[in-house]
Amino acid sequence: MSQLSQGFAIEPAFSMEAVIRRSISTLFSYPTLFFGLATLAALSSMAVQPLTHNTSSLGLVFLLALFSGLLLYLVQGAIACGVVIVLIGNDEPEWSEVCSKAFVSIGRLFLLVLCLALFVGGCTLILIPLTYFMGKAALLIVALPALVLFAALFCSWALAAPICVLEELGPIKALYRSAELTRGYRWQILGLFVLAFVCFGTVAFVLLIPLGAPSTDSGHLLYLIQSLPLFILSTFNTAFIDVMVGVIYCDLVAIKDKEETAPGEPAE
């Protein structure tokens, strides 16, 4: 992927403002592709959510979570492929090209989702007994450090899905590669995700005030009416965040490439 450092002019330094600006311009340069892919992810989440709430089987919940995670990563990988094509300026991204690139990596993405699910599940099984036996003290002694650790790992592994698709690496190597790329930039990456979630969460909260939370108890028609604004917001949220992940990947690969080719010089 060294062509990324040659295919477009990166910013003098990695910054939140530059990533947001580049993400918005990239997203709206080909809105049909990026919003179309994000719609697939939003539709799957809407379809899986009632099944998850209406079952008491932990096995089924786990399988549904794996399916949702796999589809989200497929969409993120396809969008990242489109972002790379846009930023290096080689050609216009096509549906067939980005989707085929993502589906070729479906096995690697499934293993990535499985690894992350097992990791989170294992940590949860450890934390729940600790917090139960330690009581309120666990909030400061266990919960707060665990939250910091999860935030650090989230930022370290944020690029794993695009790496699986674009660099064709397995899940463990993709996680390691993502940690290498994000080293030195994780606070800024965390700030980008927090800013995005706060903005979209605020808009979602404002929408829920006049419409109320969607509920099937009020009838299917009213449920659809209540869900439509949140569905549109979820689609926009998914499209923006996945494009942003693709932009972060491109910028960091370009920066790291220049650091490796010119050791001792400041990154451009």
Image (tube, helix red, strand yellow):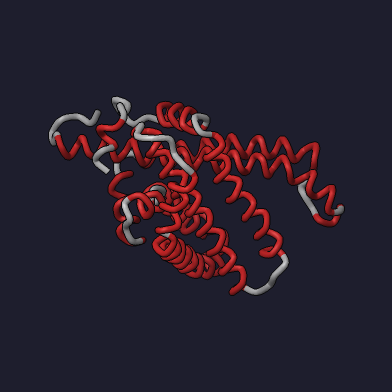
Please report the residue visible at 30 percent of the width from the left and 55 percent of the height from the top: 176
Looking at the picture, tell me which residue is in the foreground, 120 or 220. 220
**Would residue 105 be found to the left or right of residue 216 on screen?**
left
> Residue 56, image x and y in percent?
68, 72
> Residue 235, image x and y in percent?
61, 42
Residue 153 seen in the current view: no
Please report the residue visible at 39 percent of the width from the left and 62 percent of the height from the top: 108
> Residue 119, image x and y in percent?
43, 65
Please identify the quadrant where the C terminus is shown.
top left
Image vertical order of residue 228 relative to residue 138, above or below: above
**Would residue 103 be found to the left or right of residue 62 on screen?**
left
The number of callouts visible is: 0
Image vertical order of residue 262 relative to residue 176, above or below: above
Please report the residue visible at 46 percent of the width from the left and 36 percent of the height from the top: 192
The quarter holding residue 266 reads top left
Looking at the picture, tell me which residue is in the foreground, 146 or 95. 95
Image vertical order of residue 27 relative to residue 126, above or below: above
Image vertical order of residue 172 relative to residue 6, above or below: below
> Residue 183, image x and y in percent?
30, 44
Please report the residue visible at 50 percent of the width from the left and 70 percent of the height from the top: 125
**Would residue 173 be found to the left or right of residue 229 on screen?**
left
Residue 186 seen in the current view: yes
Please identify the quadrant where the N terminus is shown.
top left
